[in-house]
Amino acid sequence: MKARELRERSIEELRRSEAELREQLFKLRFQKATGQIENPVKIRLVRKDIARVQTILAQRLAEAE
C-alpha cells in the first residue's frame, strides 16, 4: 500500500483500513505460531502498512484541529 493512495482516503476509510490490517496481522501471527505461514515476510509488510495508516491518520487529525 502506497502512502499516496492512503492520502486520498477519508479518515473513516483509514480507520477501516487499519482495523482490516490489524486483523490480517493477527491471522498471520496465528499462522506463524502454528507453522502454517507461507510467506513470513508478509508480517513485516503488514506492520509497515499499519504504521503508514497511523501516520497519515495522525496527520489528518492534527490538520483538523
Image (tube, helix red, strand yellow):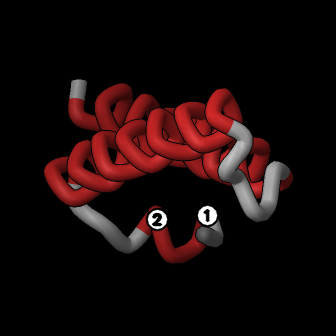
Please name the residue shown 78% across and 44% down the image: 44
The single residue placed furthest to the right in the displayed view is 41
Mark 2 lies on a secondary structure that is helix
Classify residue 26 as left or right of residue 16: right
Mark 1 lies on a secondary structure that is helix
Q: Name the foreground residue: 31 vs 58.
A: 31
Residue 59 picture location, percent across and down: 46, 36
Task: Name the residue that disc number 2 marks.
Answer: 6
Task: Name the residue that disc number 1 marks.
Answer: 3
Using the rendered image of the protein, determine whether residue 56 is visible from the camera's viewpoint. no
Residue 52 picture location, percent across and down: 60, 46
Classify residue 32 as left or right of residue 65: right
The quarter holding residue 10 reads bottom left
**Disc assigned to residue 37:** none
Query: Looking at the image, do the residues carrying marks 1 and 2 touch, with CB atoms under 8 Å apart?
Result: yes
Classify residue 32 as left or right of residue 9: right
Classify residue 56 as left or right of residue 47: left
Residue 39 picture location, percent across and down: 79, 61
Amino acid identity at mark 2: Leu
Q: CA distance from mark 1 to mark 2?
A: 5 Å
Residue 6 picture location, percent across and down: 46, 65
Amino acid identity at mark 1: Ala
| Labels in figure, total | 2
